[in-house]
Image (spheres, rainbow, N blue to C red):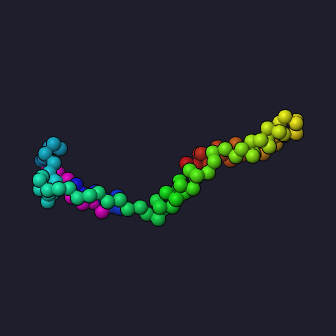
Amino acid sequence: MNPKINGVSGNSPRVESGQRSTEVRQSGTDSAAKPAADQVSLTGSGQLMVRLEKILSDLPTVDRERVETIKRAIADGTYSVNAEKVAAEVIRMEMDLNRV
């Protein structure tokens, strides 16, 4: 079998009329022949995704400086929450989820 992800398929099975699924034959292949190596081709978008995953995996998972700043503000009593901004962001995220 020689499948290709880029949409061109090699020797795909062929089912003839009246054949049971257990009797599927490979078209044009010899059972003793060595199978060819599989081939994968990435599109430009796929290659971009690979690069982005690499960049993201190199980033720290937590911005420690921001965490410390917020901790100090909470401890000092100077941390405030803008309820309208939080509500607007929750609504925006909910609307984004409904579009998916």
Residue at horizontal 83 percent and vertical 36 percent from the top: 74
Q: Position of residue 94 (x, y in %)?
A: 64, 43
Q: Is residue 81 above or below residue 54?
A: above
Image quarter of the N terminus:
bottom left
User: Does residue 81 appear left or right of residue 6 in this picture?
Assistant: right
Residue 19: x %, y % from top left: 13, 47
User: Along the horizontal axis of the image, is 50 left or right of 63?
Assistant: left
Quadrant of the image occupied by residue 66: top right
- Relative to 37, is 90 above or below? above
Q: Quadrant of residue 21?
A: top left
Q: Nearer the viewer, residue 94 or 78?
A: 78
What is the total number of numbered labels drawn onto the structure image?
0
Residue 63 seen in this snapshot? yes
Q: Which residues are magenta?
A: 8-17
In the rendered image, residue 95, in percent from the top left (x then y), is placed at 64, 46
Q: Residue at x 49, y 57 (%)?
A: 50
Judge whether residue 16 can be spotted in this image: no
Query: Residue at point 63% right, 48% down?
Result: 60
Residue 33 within the segment the image draws in magenta: no
Q: Residue furthest right?
A: 77
Seen at 17% across and 51% down, the residue is 15
Query: Which secondary structure class fits the magenta region best?
Result: loop
Residue 2 as seen in the image, left or right of residue 45: left
Q: Above or below — where is 94 with respect to 37? A: above
Q: Measuring from the top left, give residue 75's x and y in whole percent.
A: 84, 34
In the image as oriented, which residue stretches furthest toward the bottom?
A: 44
Depth order, front residue of 54/24: 54
